Image: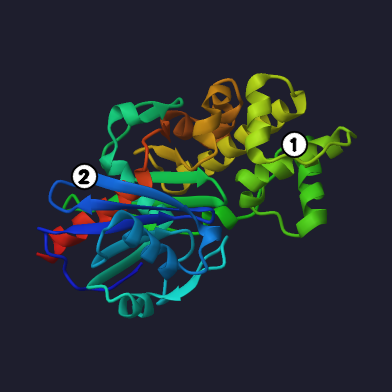
Amino acid sequence: MVNETETLPTDTCAVVADIGGTNARFCRINLTTFELDRVQVFACADYPTLTDVMTAYSREQDVPLEHVAIAIACPVDSDEINMTNHHWQFSIRGVRKSMGLKTFKVLNDFAAAAMSIVTLQPHELKQIGGGKITPKAPKAVLGAGTGLGVGHLITMPDGSVMPLPGEGGHVDWAPTNEKEWAIHRFIHNRVGRVSAERVLSGPGLETLYLALADYHGRNVVPLSAAKIGQRALSGIDTLALETVNQFFASLGSFAGNLALNLNTYGGVYIAGGVVPKLMQLMATSNFRARFEHKGRFCQVAEAIPCFVITAEHAGLRGVGQYLKQSLQQSK
């Protein structure tokens, strides 16, 4: 994470944003009460640059931009930011200077997703198998949307938490049976290397639909991820239902791998735009079976709970939590 270091006064409001490849969500946060208001969602494609959408938010919500923190869907390891699934590029210092900001902080979107975990209430989480969490144990978070985001969260000795952002969505996708090898070949013939994101994302769901049609020797019209989900939920399209079930099976294997990486007895948390919309089908899928199918380490996987985050604007809350914690540490 790269951040400007100027301390924010605790008696002011800040603007926070969660910026993905498709949408940019902005809101104002009260740094004393931690309340969110003036939430507005913008389509990234409608704005040439980040500063254009920041200016639009300020103008439309009549909110001055002084102290701003954003989470963004790409690596944040230098001053130069290049989004993975969108064309925006910018310099952190350049934006701060050109916008006249007193403070500008930038973190990876799944660092923010990880930070949001500590703000969630029990009713904002839907548990999918496993036992009870170990509160101070490592946690993992993943989310399928425009891409596949991955992060972890660890608790420090002083009780604060540290997000561990990464690019785990771009690891190799590992087929586990004959059908999945056929899917792998289909995708490989189209794009070359097959990453997990090629399967576990909104565009991945669309590709899975075509790959499974090819596997069954069927000719189909390409469908959007939203349409595939709708048709699967309604039961009118068996191929769409098979596609969603395959998505959840592969998601379970991937989530189980994350669980083993850091022994995440604090839980594995699923965010993103795809899964919450298909929750009805998740319980009857092979998600949990594939999560636990880890050979000699199946007992470890069986004990680790999974949760789907159902809270609205969790990413924004994560940015706010990061900002709040950084303020406390700067005192």
237, 49: nearer the viewer: 49
Mark-to-mark CA distance, 2 and 1: 48 Å
Task: Give the residue type at disc 2.
Answer: Glu
Position above or below: 84 against 290: below
Q: What residue is drawn where x is 31% and y is 26%?
A: 123
Position above or below: 126 against 105: above
Q: Tell me, for residue 35, which label it has, or none.
A: 2
Task: Give the residue type at disc 1.
Answer: Asn
Q: How is the image coloured?
A: rainbow
The residue pinned by badge 1 equals 177
Q: What residue is drawn where x is 57% and y is 67%?
A: 87
Along the horizontal axis of the image, is 99 left or right of 66?
right
- Residue 241, quarter of the rendered image: top right
Position above or below: 150 against 290: below
- Residue 207, quarter of the rendered image: top right
Task: Mark 2 or mark 1: name the one nearer the start of the chain.
Answer: 2
- The picture places residue 177, in percent across and down from the top left corner, at 74, 36
Instruction: Inspect this view and state whether residue 137 appears.
Output: no
- The picture places residue 292, in percent across and down from the top left corner, at 53, 31
- The picture places residue 119, in percent across and down from the top left corner, at 26, 41
Instruction: Inspect this view and state whether residue 37 appears.
Output: yes
Position above or below: 209 against 44: above
